[in-house]
Image (cartoon, rainbow, N blue to C red):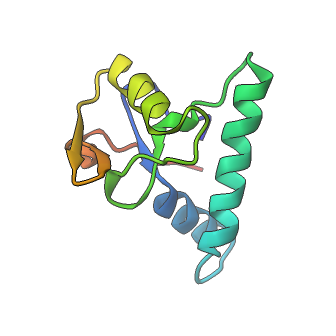
């Protein structure tokens, strides 16, 4: 999560796939990965310095994560400040054209 630069985004599904491939596994547990992503986000917010830019990690299909510190509004604000456009679909929020701003991890 710390590797994702300003203006770029990544998804939790991609992180899971990357970690599985790197470790020679078929897949990773979505529940466990989600728990640790949220732990990293909350720890970063509590620490207040040297933040992990957790707001750049989206859910599947570019959806914002309501479980992050400050919820959807906080993540939306961070992303908009970095130049992303947020769109609403029903009650859910997404980064518009998130694939165009996708960051790929390298070893």
Quarter of the image holding residue 41? top right
> Residue pushed farthest bottom?
26
Q: Is residue 78 positioned above or below 23 on the image?
A: above
User: Where residue 60 sits: x, y (%)?
Assistant: 39, 61
Q: Is residue 49 above or below residue 43?
A: above
Judging depth in this view, the residue of 103 and 92 nearest the camera is: 92
Q: Position of residue 27 (x, y in %)?
A: 59, 79
Give me the residue at 23% from left, 31% from top: 85
| Viewer-proximal residue among 48 and 20 | 48
Image side of residue 30 versus residue 98, left or right: right
Viewer-proximal residue among 4 and 74: 74
Q: Is residue 50 above or below residue 23?
A: above
Q: Residue at x 32, y 59 (%)?
A: 61
Q: How many marks?
A: 0
- The quarter of the picture where residue 18 lies is bottom right
Of the 4 image quadrants, the one containing the N terminus is top right
Question: From the viewer's perspective, is 20 left or right of 85?
Answer: right
* Residue at 77% in and 35% down: 43
Seen at 43% across and 31% down, the residue is 73
Q: Residue furthest front?
A: 91
Residue 97 on image: x %, y %: 20, 44
Q: Position of residue 40 (x, y in %)?
A: 71, 42
Please state if 74 lies on the left or on the right of 90 as rendered. Answer: right
């Amino acid at each position: 999560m710390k590797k994702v630069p300003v203006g770029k985004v990544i998804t939790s599904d991609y992180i899971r796939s990357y970690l599985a491939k790197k470790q020679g596994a078929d897949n990773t547990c979505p529940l466990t990965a989600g728990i640790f992503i949220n732990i990293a986000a909350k720890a970063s917010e509590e620490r207040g310095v040297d933040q992990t830019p957790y707001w750049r990690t989206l859910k599947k299909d570019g959806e914002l994560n309501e479980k992050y510190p400050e919820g959807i509004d906080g993540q939306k604000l961070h992303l908009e400040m970095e130049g992303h456009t947020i769109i609403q679909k029903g009650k859910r929020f997404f980064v518009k054209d998130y694939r165009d701003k996708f960051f790929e991890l390298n070893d």
